[in-house]
Image (cartoon, grey):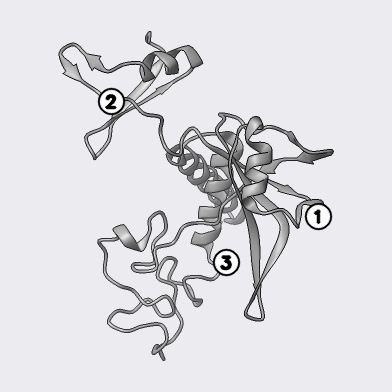
Amino acid sequence: IGKSYNARKLTTGDLQIEVTTRQQSSALLSLNKISDISVTVTRHRTLNIVKGVISESQLLDCSDTEIEEGLKDQGVVTARRIVMRRDGKDIPTRHIVLSFQLHRLPQTIKAGYLNCHVRPYIPNPRRCFKCQRFGHGSQVCRGHAICPKCAGMDHSAESCANEVRCANCKGSHPVYSRSCPRWQEEKEILKMKVTQNISYREAKTQVEFARKGTFSEVVRRGVAPLR
């Protein structure tokens, strides 16, 4: 496959290899042995998928399956309509999240006679409902159970009568508040990851660097010189 690739060993023992050309990908997928070692090569489940959103009122009567079938020749592998919860009822919206088996998001797609504009899908930060931290789910969490309202332990949110305190930023709001600085930072990281087509780690590094630079500039301008 040449020398233009990145490889790293995962905690599972698997080797993750990132290549730059379709020819490299085809060559890797055809491998079944390296030296005398038998290997199995598969596509990464998520890294080869990009997500976008279309908003079309004319598709409100179409099911997710119908949309998937109608758009599969354009690289669409899944379609999920965004549903709002209001007054205890699920209300379908005109917004549809499409997953493409592509490396880059198309600007438009054709749905029958409709020319649909595709914009990047920026997911909300994933928060563990057990330890309340971002980046993983409760199914794999090894942390302690934390109350989402007061950041305390050994009780549920329903029975909590303590003062409200965020488990992530220590502010006076519940951990699920979208006004939380940590939630907003995570959202910013995810936005950069999607729009710049980079890894989460790279996006986090860039966002943290930009925030430190902004803070340093504020301090530099805001501190009066000693007299």
Residue 140: assigned label = none
- Category of crowding for the residue at label 3, using alpha-carbon neighbours closer than 10 angstroms: few (below 14), some (14–19), many (at least 20): few
Of the two numbered discs 1 and 3 in the rendering, the one whose residue sits closer to the viewer: 1
Q: Residue at x 30, y 72 (%)?
A: 145
Q: Residue at x 53, y 54 (%)?
A: 185
Secondary structure under badge 3? Answer: loop
* Residue for badge 3: 178
Residue type for callout 1: Ser
Secondary structure under badge 2? Answer: loop
Residue type for callout 2: Thr
* Residue for badge 2: 40
Residue 57: assigned label = 1
In the image, is residue 137 above or below residue 19? below
Q: Nearer the viewer, residue 145 or 61?
A: 61
Q: Is residue 105 left or right of residue 146?
A: right
Q: Earlier in the sequence, mark 3 or mark 2?
A: 2
Residue 212 in the image: state x and y as whole percent. Answer: 50, 47
Residue 146 in the image: state x and y as whole percent. Answer: 33, 74
In the image, is residue 104 above or below residue 53? above
Q: Is residue 142 left or right of residue 214?
A: left
Q: CA distance from mark 2 to mark 1?
A: 44 Å
In the image, is residue 130 above or below residue 43? below
- Category of crowding for the residue at label 2, using alpha-carbon neighbours closer than 10 angstroms: few (below 14), some (14–19), many (at least 20): few
Residue 93, quarter of picture: bottom right
Secondary structure under badge 1? Answer: helix
Regarding residue 1, the answer to whether it shows in the image is yes
